[in-house]
Amino acid sequence: MAQVLISGIFDVISFGTAKFTGTFKSAYKKLGGDMRRRVDDAIESLLISRDPRKEGHMLHGEWEGCYSFEIGLKYRLIYRVNFKRKEIEFLAVGTHKIY
């Protein structure tokens, strides 16, 4: 999954690198084909953004320091941005119930 996903995205990256947690990879594998494409598009959008933090909204509590990007009305992509390393770490994907 990650290799296919990443190989398609790295051609257009302007922000930096992407990391995917085991939790993210596991949830991604469970998604249907259409939702995977939508998640891929969301990841690409974040990676080419000048400031990926502004693309989502800041989370609090357990997810403090992370951001949530809406994929339609039902799904969310949770990520963390490290500007020093120009890196986005994708932590989870799923319905609103993930946080």
Image (tube, rainbow, N blue to C red):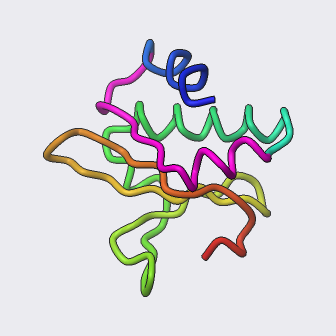
Nearest to the observer: residue 68 or residue 32: 32
Residue 94: % across, % down: 71, 59
Residue found at the far bottom of this picture: 61
Look at the image and tell me in which quarter the N terminus lies: top right
- Tell me the quarter of the picture where residue 62 sits: bottom left
Residue 2: % across, % down: 56, 30
Q: Could you tell whether 96 is left or right of 82 in the image? A: right
Say if 52 sits above or below 67 in the image.
Answer: above
- Tell me the quarter of the picture where residue 28 sits: top right
- The residue at 32%/39% (across/down) is 50
Residue found at the far left of this picture: 84
Nearest to the observer: residue 51 or residue 1: 1
Say if 45 sits above or below 80 in the image.
Answer: above
- The residue at 48%/49% (across/down) is 21
Numbered disc total: 0
Residues rendered magenta in the picture = 12-30
In reply to whether residue 92 is colored magenta, the answer given is no
Nearest to the observer: residue 94 or residue 22: 22
Residue 10: % across, % down: 43, 18
Residue found at the far top of this picture: 11
Say if 47 sits above or below 11 in the image.
Answer: below
Residue 93: % across, % down: 64, 55
Q: Could you tell whether 88 is left or right of 99 in the image? A: left
Look at the image and tell me in which quarter the C terminus lies: bottom right
In reply to whether residue 27 is colored magenta, the answer given is yes
- The residue at 47%/43% (across/down) is 20
- The residue at 39%/23% (across/down) is 13
